[in-house]
Image (cartoon, rainbow, N blue to C red):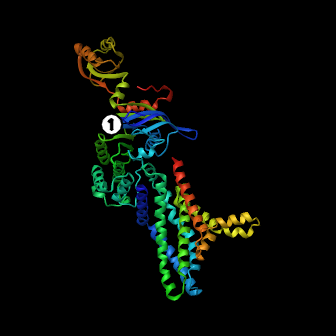
């Protein structure tokens, strides 16, 4: 059994369709109370992984457990603990929003006496009050997405699986949907798939990066940033003689290379880009060295963005992947 | 059990929220009304026997319209993923849907009861024969719906589901008539036993035979079991 705290646990899970392997040896866990972002380009295997956790398909090998239940043998027990929003919200267009939610609540075993309050709760959480009696086919895309989200929340499941919950929404709707999801984080274990990077930094505590069916990294956004900072860059602008500045910088410990350009229109003013290693305080040493002898106008350390990290991970060939 | 009831209610709501149920009811009742009027007033028969025969054939072509959406509609509406990940057992889904369709069948059947008014006013019908005929009609309808529901689970397209179901049901109906081409006793009995038409004919004559009842019940049970196993296998 997995530890009692793992709401979702995958142990070397693979999924094959015929001779094609869609998911290769993926392992990770999601704990209660955290939102984990599941990041990858289209076709990376996010949806397949989500479907295996939700119990829509089974793993070809390895083990998926949700709330301690093995999905291969106890998927019925686990289904009570899962709220799942598939990529396309699964809505019955001809029903009213409340008829639809009532149907889902009943199948999830919400007690008859509690259905009304449960519907009120999810409608409030997903801001659906205005459309509760409207037929679903009349709703806008944003509302449809939120009805799908409300459906997943019914019955207070331990685990929420949200497959691209903000895809196709306008910026205002994205903002609102994110707020809603963020508010779930405390009571549920949330696995959120997306290919929007900023979404992950905004709402997720940890990020799993997947490509071509392989899990490439799983860490906090900051952790991923640190791990990829084996080399980083410091840029500065100073008024100084180029040769003296170059030899001064290269004499500092931690500076690996220096590139100097003149600032057009300003004689003797230089833009400098230093390649440094990851040691602490290297930019402070550079600042002291330059400012002690010449005029230092600007100095900054370039943080690698999550975007760059992501691109680096997904552009690596499968063989050269090293988990940080 | 609760899950099955929830699915059943959803199916009924969906039927009456879309034009299908009304359309099917209307087509069936207009058709039956026509046959009844013809049999009663043109040929002067004072019984339901002929009308039941016509209703049987009409049912073969109308019931696929009721069953075609049951699963194909879930696939094309992308709701299958929800249905299969909710805490529902496959048999709860299958039976809930089946009972929803059977309810439409019962409504169709109930609609034809109006024919009995002129029958009893102007004719001298045998009540027991009529009851037997109705029992046979509902059993036949259940078998047709169960078969149609199974084929609906095999395709994402409702029209395809109906187009497969109609010829299959027609073959089951007409297979008995192949008897005359058979010399072998075994084949003759087999074709006779598989025939929807022959079993239904017994009911129409007023005979409620255990053989007939079990036949339709078994056909429904096999189709529904295949349906549930298919859903299980698809995971």
The image quarter in which residue A138 lies: bottom left
Quadrant (top left/top right/bottom left/bottom right) for the N terminus of chain B: bottom left
Give the farthest residue toward the bottom. Answer: B122
Question: How far across and how far down the image is residue B188, in percent?
Answer: 71, 66
The residue sitting at 27% across, 15% down in the picture is A285
Q: Position of residue B68 (x, y in %)?
A: 52, 62
Quadrant in the picture for residue A196: top left
Q: Return the x and y of residue B74 as percentages of the image width and height.
A: 47, 56
Where residue A119 sits, quadrant-wise, is: bottom left
In the image, is residue B206 above or below residue B75? below
Residue, far right: B183
Q: Quick one: which residue is furthest to the front in this view? A: B210
Numbered label tally: 1
What is the secondary structure assignment of the residue under circle 1? loop
Name the residue nearer the viewer: A3 or A49. A3
Left or right? Give the position of A153 relative to B155: left
Q: Nearer the viewer, residue B164 or A116?
A: A116
> Is residue A197 visible to the viewer in this orientation of the structure?
no
Which of these two is toward me, B196 or A125? B196
Q: Position of residue B72 (x, y in %)?
A: 50, 57
* Vertical position of residue A219 compared to residue B234: above or below: above
Up/down of B218 relative to A231, above or below: below
Q: Residue at x 26, y 20 (%)?
A: A238
Query: In the rendered image, which residue does mark 1 sit on?
Result: A34
What's the chain of the residue with tag 1? A
Crowd around label 1: few <14 · some 14–19 · many ≥20 (10 Å): many
Residue B109 seen: yes
Question: At 61% from the left edge and 64% from the top edge, which residue is drawn?
Answer: B167
């Amino acid at each position: 059994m997995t530890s009692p705290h793992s709401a979702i646990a995958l142990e070397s899970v693979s999924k094959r369709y015929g001779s094609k392997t869609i998911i290769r040896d993926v392992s990770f866990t999601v704990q209660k109370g955290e939102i984990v972002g599941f990041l990858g380009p289209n076709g990376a295997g996010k949806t397949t992984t989500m479907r295996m956790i939700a119990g829509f398909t089974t793993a070809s090998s390895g083990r998926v457990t949700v709330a301690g239940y093995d999905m291969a043998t106890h998927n019925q027990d686990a289904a009570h603990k899962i709220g799942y929003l598939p990529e396309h919200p699964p809505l019955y267009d001809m029903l009213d929003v409340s008829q639809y939610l009532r149907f889902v609540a009943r199948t999830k075993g919400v007690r008859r006496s509690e259905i009304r309050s449960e519907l009120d709760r999810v409608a409030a959480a997903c801001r659906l009050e205005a459309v509760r009696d409207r037929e679903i086919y009349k709703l806008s895309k944003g509302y449809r997405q939120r009805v799908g989200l409300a459906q997943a929340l019914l019955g207070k499941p331990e685990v929420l699986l949200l497959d691209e919950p903000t895809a196709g929404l306008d910026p205002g709707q994205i903002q609102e949907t994110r707020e809603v999801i963020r508010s779930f984080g405390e009571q549920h274990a949330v696995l959120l798939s997306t290919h929007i990077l900023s979404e992950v930094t905004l709402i997720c505590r940890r990020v799993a990066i997947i490509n071509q069916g392989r899990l490439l990294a799983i860490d906090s956004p900051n952790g991923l940033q640190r791990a990829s900072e084996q080399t980083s860059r410091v840029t500065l602008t100073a008024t100084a003689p180029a040769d003296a500045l170059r030899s001064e910088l290269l004499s500092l410990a931690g500076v690996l290379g220096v590139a100097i350009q003149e600032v057009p229109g300003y004689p003797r003013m230089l833009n400098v880009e230093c390649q440094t290693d990851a040691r602490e305080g290297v930019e402070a040493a550079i600042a002291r060295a330059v400012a002690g002898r010449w005029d230092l106008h600007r100095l900054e350390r370039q943080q690698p963005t999550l975007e760059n990290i992501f691109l680096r991970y997904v552009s690596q060939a499968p063989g050269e992947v090293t988990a940080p | 059990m609760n899950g099955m009831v929830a699915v059943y209610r959803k199916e009924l709501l969906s039927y009456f929220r879309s034009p299908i149920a009304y359309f099917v009811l209307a087509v069936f009742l207009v058709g039956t009304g026509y046959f009844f009027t013809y049999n009663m007033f043109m040929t002067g028969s004072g019984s339901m026997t002929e009308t039941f025969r016509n209703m049987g054939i009409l049912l073969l072509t109308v019931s696929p319209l009721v069953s075609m959406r049951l699963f194909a509609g879930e696939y094309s509406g992308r709701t299958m993923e929800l249905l299969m990940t909710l805490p529902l057992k496959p048999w709860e889904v299958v039976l809930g849907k089946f009972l929803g369709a059977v309810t439409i069948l019962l409504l169709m059947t109930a609609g034809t009861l109006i024919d009995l008014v002129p029958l009893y006013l102007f004719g001298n019908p045998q009540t027991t024969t009529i009851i037997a005929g109705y029992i046979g009609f509902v059993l036949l309808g259940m078998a047709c719906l169960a078969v149609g529901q199974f084929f609906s689970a095999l395709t994402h397209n409702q029209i395809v589901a109906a187009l497969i179901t109609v010829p299959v049901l027609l073959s089951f109906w007409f297979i008995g008539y192949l008897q005359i081409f058979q010399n072998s006793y075994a084949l003759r009995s087999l074709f006779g036993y598989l025939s929807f038409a022959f079993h239904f004919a017994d009911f129409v004559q007023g005979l409620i035979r255990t053989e007939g009842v079990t036949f339709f019940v078994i056909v429904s049970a096999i189709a529904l079991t295949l349906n549930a196993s298919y859903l299980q296998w698809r995971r």
